[in-house]
Structure formats: structure tokens, C-alpha cells
């Protein structure tokens, strides 16, 4: 059996602990070697798991010398932490957003590419088998040419979610926090987004950051799309509440993405493929076939892949450059909301 990749985790908070759990589920592809996080709960966790604990990443890299590093620290630290990993020659899986601004993100990506150190972005939804199936259907031309997509991201975050000040400030909000994952998936399935236009509102919650936004986007290939997001709407239509990826969200069985093509349409996450057996016409019946896939936790699949990248047996699937491209679209959306005009996506 191949030797397990020794992976350390920096930032053992909400998602860092999920990564730690994922490492344990890779069936020997990876093993946890150390944790870096200045907090007492992280120190206690390291003791519980019997791995070395470090207050900061540079000591971890110097002393534990891991084969790979998961960076699950707050957004503001990702670039600095990523650059440390690159300097140590250690491949990193960096949580989204890879940076809080695209200039900084570009600096990180270029440094990784120049040093030949692989950097993955934590857009784990891409490793969901249902997205792999959707990608295959689109690539095989089962929808014909993609014409338009519709993304729904309505959910309700309770008051205690907003207790930390940063969650009420620009840089948080449903666009930065949630939509960035949806944008990554739409670009993965339908190609790069070229231009966006956005109206946003903070009318309901009254925070400095938006609680709701509607966005139009144009893909470079000519397809169009809309996204409609809110964290203050009690509703069943969002990836979180439909994809059954994370058991903390009670699933609803509704759809959140519709992808329309000249020869068929796809509904996700249900994977219903709508098509017409005979003449394509609004006067003819249209049928849905349920496409099959078997679920496996995308975080575990992402970790197994990271282990393969570290060993050099797999090419990086979701790179920091992909994460940067999603970030650029998010920046354009927020700029459009601020300036009241359509904005071209940079890069
Ligand atoms: N992929 C996803 O679905 C997903 C989900 C949640 C969060 N995230 C991302 O993961 C990151 C962490 O989010 P979270 O919700 O787990 O936050 P969190 O606040 O729960 O955890 C962050 C942890 O990092 C530690 N930390 C802070 N500075 C550090 C440093 N310099 N070095 C080491 N540790 C440090 C903190 O003590 C804390 O334990 C964010 O970038 C967030 O956007 C991604």
C-alpha cells in the first residue's frame, strides 16, 4: 500500500475540524501530522488526537515538516499563510476565498506557480459526484448548447449567526460567503463569466453588508445567467438546503440550479435531465429522466485528491487560480452593486 501523505491543518475551527475528520476517512491516503492554531480549543484537540500542536504556522512548517498543509484560517490570513507554505515547498489546500482581494490572490497564485508548489482552492463542491455527473452531461452535449442558467441561493441565517462583528461587515454577506461557491460551479459547468450586473440590498437586516442580491451575468461563450441570493428569506432553494452535503442543513428535496440548453435542460441537485424525444417544441411533451450517481462526502474526496497531488500521482483539479477566478467574479458583482453599472470581470 502507498504511504499516507502527512497532512497538517492550520486553523482548527469550524471547517478545519471537518478537514481533520476528512483526513481520517481517506482510507489511509492521508494522515494528520500536526495542528497550528493559537486557540486553546485547538491545543486540546491536538492533545486528544495525539498530534503535535503549534501556535503558528511557521513553527509547524519548521518542526513538523508536513507533506501538505490545509489552510483553514480566517480569510484575511490566507495569502500570508499560503506564501509561508510555498516558501517551505509544501503543497497547500487553501480554503475559499483564496484571498480577500484579487491583487493579493494573484500574488499568491503567481508565487505558487513560479515555485512549482501546487495550491488547491477549497471549492469542495466540485468533488461532489453529482457535480461530476452534471459536468459530464454538459460536456457530452446532452443539453446541446447552454443558453442560460439560473441559480437560487435563498436561506435564513438566525440572529446568533451575526454575533461576530465581521459577519455584518463588507467581505461577509451572502455574495462573498455563499455565492462564491455557486459561481465556481457555474464557471466549472458553463465556462468563464465575462460581465456582471448586480442590485443588492441591506434593507431587511440593516447591516453594512448586503442581505440580498440579484445578479445577471454573461459568460464568455455567450450564455447568460442569473443568481438570486438572500440570507434573510425563509426558503428551501439553495445548494446548502438541497445538496445533502452537510448534515447540519436539513434537506428539502427542491432544486437550486437550472441549466437550460438548446436540446435539454438540467435541474440540480436532483440531476433531472429534461428533454424532448421527438420534435423540439413548446407544443410537444417534455420528459425528465433521473440521472444516477452515488454520493460520497466531497470533503473526503477533496482530501484524498490532495493526498494524490502531494504524492504527484494526480494533477490538481481545483487550483488556487480557479479560486482566484471565482473571486474576480465576486469582486465585479460587488463593484456593480456599488457603482450601479455592469462590470467586466478582470483577469
Ligand atoms: N469550504 C467551505 O464550505 C467553508 C465552510 C466554512 C468556512 N470556510 C472557510 O474556512 C475558513 C475558516 O472558516 P471557519 O468558519 O472555520 O472559521 P473559524 O473562526 O471557525 O476558525 C478559524 C480558526 O483559525 C484559527 N486561526 C486564526 N488565525 C490563525 C493563524 N494565523 N494560524 C493558525 N490558526 C489561526 C482560529 O483560532 C480559529 O480556530 C474561512 O476562510 C472560511 O471562508 C469554508
Image (cartoon, rainbow, N blue to C red):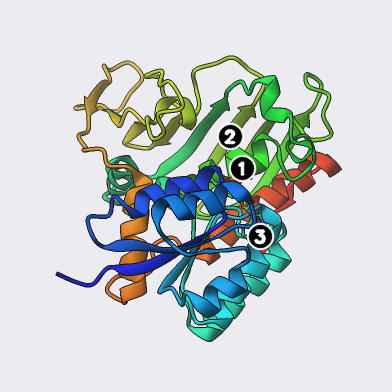
Q: Residues within 10 Å of mark 1 (few under 14, many from 20)?
A: many
Q: Mark 1 touching mark 3, by CB under 8 A?
A: no
Point 54% across, 81% down: residue: 88
Tell me how far mark 1 sits from mark 3, CA to CA: 22 Å
Q: Is residue 85 above or below residue 260?
A: below
Please identify the quarter of the rendering in which residue 112 is found. bottom right
Q: Which quarter shows the N terminus? A: bottom left
Tell me if residue 289 comes above or below residue 122 in the rendering: above
| Element under disc 1 | strand
Which of the two discs, 3 and 2, sits closer to the camera? 3
Q: Quadrant of residue 57?
A: bottom right
Where disc 3 sits, the SS reads loop
Question: Which of the two labelled residues, at mark 3 and mark 2, occupies the earlier sequence position?
Answer: 3
Instruction: Report the side of 230 relative to 141 (left or right).
Output: right
From the viewer's perspective, tell me whether residue 126 is left or right of residue 291. Answer: right
* Circle nearer the N terminus (1, 3): 3
According to the picture, the residue beneath numbered tag 1 turns out to be: 217
The residue at which mark 3 appears reads as 99
Where is residue 75, by image quadrant? bottom right
On the image, numbered disc 2 is attached to which residue? 226
Q: Earlier in the sequence, mark 1 or mark 2?
A: 1
- Answer yes or no: is residue 223 visible: no
Amino acid at each position: 500500500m502507498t504511504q499516507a501523505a502527512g497532512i497538517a491543518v492550520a486553523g482548527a475551527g469550524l471547517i478545519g475540524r471537518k478537514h481533520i475528520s476528512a483526513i481520517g476517512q481517506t482510507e489511509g491516503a492521508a494522515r494528520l501530522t500536526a495542528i497550528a492554531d493559537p486557540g486553546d480549543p485547538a491545543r486540546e484537540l491536538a492533545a486528544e488526537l495525539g498530534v503535535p500542536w503549534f501556535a503558528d504556522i511557521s513553527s509547524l512548517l519548521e518542526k513538523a515538516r508536513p507533506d501538505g498543509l490545509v489552510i483553514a484560517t480566517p480569510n484575511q490570513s490566507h495569502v500570508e499563510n499560503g506564501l509561508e507554505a510555498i516558501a517551505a515547498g509544501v503543497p497547500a489546500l487553501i480554503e475559499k476565498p483564496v484571498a480577500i482581494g484579487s491583487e493579493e490572490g494573484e500574488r499568491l497564485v503567481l508565487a505558487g506557480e513560479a515555485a512549482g508548489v501546487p495550491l488547491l482552492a477549497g471549492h469542495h463542491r466540485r468533488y461532489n459526484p453529482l457535480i461530476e455527473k452534471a459536468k459530464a452531461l454538459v460536456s457530452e452535449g446532452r443539453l446541446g448548447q447552454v443558453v442560460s442558467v439560473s441559480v437560487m441561493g435563498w436561506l435564513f441565517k438566525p440572529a446568533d449567526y451575526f454575533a461576530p462583528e465581521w459577519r455584518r461587515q463588507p467581505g461577509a454577506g451572502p455574495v462573498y460567503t455563499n455565492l462564491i461557491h455557486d459561481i465556481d460551479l457555474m464557471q466549472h459547468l458553463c465556462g468563464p463569466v465575462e460581465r456582471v450586473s448586480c442590485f443588492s440590498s441591506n434593507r431587511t437586516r440593516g447591516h453594512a453588508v448586503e442581505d440580498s442580491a440579484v445578479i445577471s451575468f454573461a459568460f464568455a461563450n455567450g450564455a447568460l445567467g442569473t443568481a438570486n441570493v438572500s440570507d434573510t428569506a425563509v426558503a428551501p432553494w439553495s445548494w446548502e438546503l438541497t445538496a445533502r452535503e452537510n448534515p447540519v442543513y436539513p434537506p428539502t428535496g427542491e432544486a437550486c440550479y437550472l441549466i437550460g440548453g438548446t436540446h435539454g435542460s438540467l435541474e440540480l441537485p436532483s440531476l433531472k435531465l429534461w428533454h424532448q424525444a421527438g420534435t423540439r417544441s413548446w407544443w410537444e411533451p417534455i420528459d425528465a429522466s433521473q440521472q444516477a450517481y452515488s454520493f460520497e462526502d466531497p470533503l473526503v474526496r477533496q482530501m484524498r485528491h490532495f493526498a494524490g497531488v502531494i504524492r504527484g500521482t494526480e494533477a490538481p483539479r481545483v487550483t488556487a487560480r480557479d479560486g482566484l477566478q471565482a473571486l474576480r467574479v465576486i469582486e465585479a458583482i460587488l463593484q456593480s452593486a456599488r457603482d450601479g453599472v455592469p462590470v467586466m470581470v478582470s483577469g
